[in-house]
Image (cartoon, coloured by chain):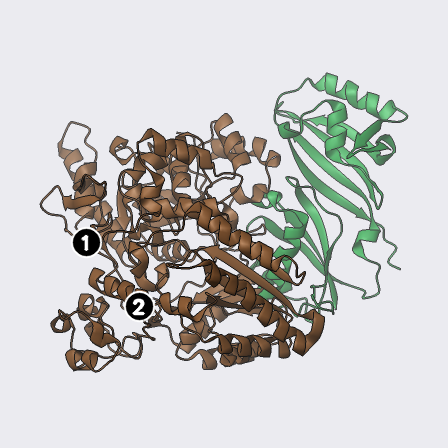
Chain colours: A brown, B green
Amino acid sequence: MLTPEQIERKLDRILLKVQKPGRYVGGELNSIQKDWDSVQTRVALVFPDIYDIGVSNMGLKILYDQINQREDALAERAYAPWLDMEDLMRQHGIPLYALESKRPLACFDLIGFTLPYETLYTNTLNVLDLAGIPVRSAERDERHPIIIAGGHACMNPEPMHAFIDAFVIGEGEEVIHEIIDTIQNAKRQTSKVNLNDVQPLTFDREALLRELAQIPGVYVPRFYEASYLDDGTVARIEPTVADVPKIITKRIVAKLPPPPTKFIVPNVDIVHNRVSVEIMRGCTRGCRFCHAGMITRPVRERSVDEILQAAEEALKSTGFEELALLSLSSSDYTHVLELVTKVGEKFGGTHLKVSLPSLRIESVSIDLMERLKDRRSGGFTLAPEAATERMRRIINKFIPDEDIINTTREIYRRGWTTIKLYFMIGHPSETLEDVKAIADLCKRVLAEGRKVIGWKAKLHAGVSTFVPKSQTPFQWVSCDTPEQIKAKQELLKRELYRDKNIKLSLTDAEDSFLEAWLSRGDRRMAEVVYSAWKKGSKFDAWKEGKKYDAWMEAFAEHGLDPLFYTHRQRRTDEVFPWEHITAAVRKNFLFQDFRMSLEGEIRVDCRLNCYACGILPTFAGLRRENPGEGWKCPDVKSPSLKVISNSVISKQPAQSDAEELPVVGD
Amino acid sequence: MRIQITFSKQGALRYTGHLDLHKLWERAARRAELPLAYSHGFHPQPKISMAAALPLGFASRCEVLDMKLERDIPLEGLRDTLQGTLPPGIQILAIEQVDDRAPALQTRVVSAEYEVTLTEPVDGSELKRRIDAVMNAESILRSRRGKEYDLRPLIESLTSVSSPEGRGEKIIMKLSAKEGATGRPEEVLDVLGIAFEETRIERTRLNLSTNLH
């Protein structure tokens, strides 16, 4: 294996031939390079997309911070090199290396991938290959690092089951330590054996993976087997060994640990040059299309003081020009007014830009933004997601039209000239009329804006395509066909192109299909991923990388039909490929919510009413150990009574799991 | 208050370009809590200017920048404070106060000196012969980005030295660096028949005109 010095020498010969060589050299402020020989476990954390996007990933930041706090372990980073760099690396025999020490990835004990979205799958294979590590889990032996992955896409890990040794389901802050401890234990035992034994014995990979599978929230796919029915759907997914769990339940942390504050400061420009502080995790709104909202429950908030202190420390240690206060729904943060007031007081007049994404469509949001911004630059973003009230009932993001009109008019009136509205097309049962309503709403918003500020008013409509995700109420629904999506997109173009002050952005329909095959794919999809990568597809989220034809050929090669995964309404009794993985939101609950969507019934904020999604019984113990304000699930004292008294909820099937609900606060 | 900072740029920072270096200093000043002055207008920019852009991949031990502060601060201890906020690869060599009315740094640069280390073995006497040929030429017409220009008058001096251990040669050059008349080391290397990727280049000195008004 090449030494760091050899790698650096080779790099010096090629770096000036690539775009932005600063991506590949490390040396950033706040990066941590520990003495390699002073620790027992070396972890490489990989974001399998380019540096420019990967550096600001929150998940890896947290893990980098967590691991490097340990004295017995180190964490370094790697990203996927862009196409030009990859070519030169292969040409010059440079394996993928970690930025801190310049050691090949293959030298590490553990490699952790974050997979927030499905279009990173081919890149993950490519990164392993570029690191000289066999891409298939079954082909790796005790010489190779253990390959783990986590992140939102892993809520259905099956399309990647053949390549990843162990998946972390849910939040990684605690489980990463348990994984490192387990690896250290295995190695210690091995070295004891080594002392007494003449044979060169290294650790037993299979045994180690078996131990990892004992850790709650860790899924080791090699110990499970899937069987299929004649119609191609899953019959069963079962453990093949006795001591692994039948169902893997996601991990959560009871209390959010202190946010990281020593962010890496890149020496080259990246996408998000900012400090981000997670103010809250989870969401109580229950939008039915929203993967994050379903899988990150329960809501846990940080205190205003903790957020302010972290923001101040992080700004001091980075000098970044922007602060982002992150959550899935800022308006729902209990102390949002206090927070923005104090942020405004503390950082006002310092040229700091503050962003507060995901605001509700109401005038309070404008008040919040006014407190944060000295000037009205950058536009005001709102996400109605759908343009008819019927549609908004179906997706459970109910806002009356008048609220949208009144709020946007007020935004223009208070000095913003650009409003960005985000919509999705392809929602279940959406018609062309619903799509045309998007155009009509945009025109109406702009017309109101013109009444207030005249021709300065501008509108930006971002229209993406809905992709049904696992572990959500829409996991049963079919996607629109390519023809339907194209017709809907054409309609929007036709309706909106005439007005120069409306800018329309659409997502590429092919990108959405790729995401859709993978997000509800089964184990057989792994071979499709492998073949698509072999045929040259990578950087699937980029037009420069993705090869749609390669994917189509890959499907054909393995006798699978992409439409089976996308354009098929699932049977009500269908066993999903991810049936053995749970985000602790019960399938019954999701199904009931799906049925309600068909009736146009909404469920309001579950901070007010518990709808018994399953989080509380699953994590009853954790909550009991951590009483107080942190969790935003309502206290459910006499659950059966409370549930029945609610009119929406009374439609629940009779078998309520009231008895499972914990009695909290006693 | 206006301060001038002389610093070196080495290691990983060689791959940080001019604009990114600007940003780097802006952030360093913020981390050190300096009262950085900003331009007015819709997009306020910090008042930082650099003497001469250093091409990507070059190291330097003589970069100079100029920073305007909103108010006076003591210079004592500033070097340590600021150095503590910089990434590895940037070393402050000097900080001094300059007259607020002094002309812009970029207009004062006259010439730059470079030391080129050859990473592959070359024939020393052949190299000397080529250098002589360059220095004896009356003009060296070249074209860069579609524009014809004469390189020769931009070369003020050009010599080679063999390292005492016989491990490789070094080329030392001094090139004009006035506005509109800037010599580029890689152009000179190309004339000498030396591949750019077989070199390490360091800027060793920026000559500034001493005329401050």
What residue is rendered at 42% in x and 58% in y?
A58
Is residue A533 toward the left or the right of residue A560 in the image?
right
Q: Is residue B95 above or below residue A643?
A: above
In the rendered image, residue B58, in percent from the top left (x then y), is placed at 66, 40
Is residue A232 toward the left or the right of residue B5 in the image?
left
Q: Is residue A162 above or below residue A479?
A: above
Q: Chain of mark 2?
A: A
- Residue bearing the label numbered 2: A599
Tell me the kind of residue under disc 2: Glu
Q: Secondary structure at mark 1?
A: loop
Q: Is residue A237 above or below residue A285?
A: above
In the rendered image, residue B189, in percent from the top left (x then y), is placed at 73, 28
What residue is rendered at 40% in x and 75% in y?
A332
In the rendered image, residue A164, in percent from the top left (x then y), is placed at 29, 41
Q: Quadrant of the C terminus of chain A?
A: bottom left
> Which numbered tag is attached to residue A199?
none
Graded by Cα atoms within 10 Å as few (under 14), some (14 to 19) or many (20 or more), the crowding at tag 1 reads few
Q: Quadrant of the N terminus of chain A?
A: top left
- Residue bearing the label numbered 1: A573
